[in-house]
Image (cartoon, grey):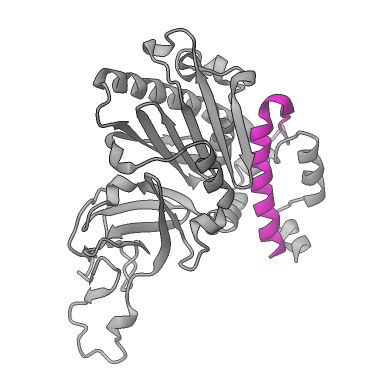
Amino acid sequence: MVACASQDLDIDVAEIDARLADNWSLPTRFYWDPDIFDFEMAAIFAKRWQFFCPAQKVMNPGDVAVRQIGRYPIVVTRDRDGRLHGFLNICRHRGYTVAERDQSKCLRLVCRYHAWSYNLDGSLANAPDADGEAGFCQGQLGLMPVSVETWGAAVLVHPDPNAVSLRETYPEMFRTAEEIGFDVDAADYMPVKTVDYDIQTNWKLWYDNGTECYHCPHIHGGSFGEAFNVAPEDTVIRLKENFSSYSFKAKQDDGANRLTADNYVSFQLYPGMTYIVHDDFMHMTGMTPITPGVTRHSAYYFAEKDADPTRVEGWLKIWDDTYREDNQATAIQHENLKSARQPYNRYVAGREYAAQHFNAMIWADYKAALAA
């Protein structure tokens, strides 16, 4: 079965195993091939916990948040009893959405197509003109559930309604967070800004870029690379199964915009979440693959309630500049790799071992899906 699936996708498992072991990348075809992209949606994004939104968006009864996770449109609600729920944002009638992308509050989820409505726990509340229909069972027509949990100030979802819990899936991540004192209370922060970056690149190039700071002194010389000490000997990288964690030291001088941060800590949860806290500033980002060559990177920025507004604006500029520089770099990479003349990229293991760790996680999911 592995051989058949591998042949269908033109994947030489033995060759890729050898290449990865010898500090090469995944085949560059994997960054633009639509068949590979389709395979990844099922092999990775349908089977993983992923960042959904900040907890502040669904803290109160009646709160609603909408986001795409892989190929799944998802809505998360807080019901009147304060319980959190997640569902496919798909009406059980004819498949229209039951919540709009910019919706933030409601008493019921209502499909605008034919006005079917659902309670915030997902149960069907009303289907116009369906009373008395033969075989129509209202109790069996609730929204299709997904798994939803919180971690600190973040909400995560899993497309599988019977997924193993977040803590059971990533026990090492929770242990690491406890060991380094990464304990975030959403109530301590206030939202500052949300930015969606639609990038002309493949999701793996975008994520690969975020795992290493080999590039930071070069393309981030006036942004992240100026605010933080990015020297490898002063960077702490913790690589674990399914996640990584980073700590950077502040510059000894004033840094970018005369800003420095003394306690930078971040977590990257594979395949698309980044969770960053430094001093009085916090932000979370989620990545959504749209097509093989388009990736949406959603950044949610927060500051502690008593933070200096000028300082907050300075950090917003640093991070926005940093992400836009990354976006441009990865878009150039993607355009170049589509030429299909360079079958593999070569890593510098001493500086890019975190990117190689990320590639190994992708490849493990590929092989598991091929074997299944």
Q: Is residue 361 magenta?
A: yes
- Type of secondary structure dominating the magenta stretch: helix
The residue nearer to you, when weighing 167 against 112, is: 167
Residue 75 appears in the rendering: yes
Magenta stretch bounds: 345-372
Residue pictured at 19% horizontal, 58% vertical: 106
Residue 9 lies, in percent from the top left, at 69, 54
Q: Quadrant of residue 75?
A: bottom left
Q: Position of residue 305 (x, y in %)?
A: 25, 31
Q: Quadrant of residue 16?
A: top right
- Does residue 338 appear anywhere in the picture? no
Q: Position of residue 288 (x, y in %)?
A: 46, 45
State which quarter of the image contains the C terminus. Answer: bottom right
Instruction: Look at 53% across and 54% down and name the residue there.
Output: 45
Q: Relative to 141, does residue 86 appear above or below in the rendering?
A: above
Measuring from the top left, give residue 233's x and y in whole percent.
64, 19
Identified at 37% across, 12% down, the residue is 257
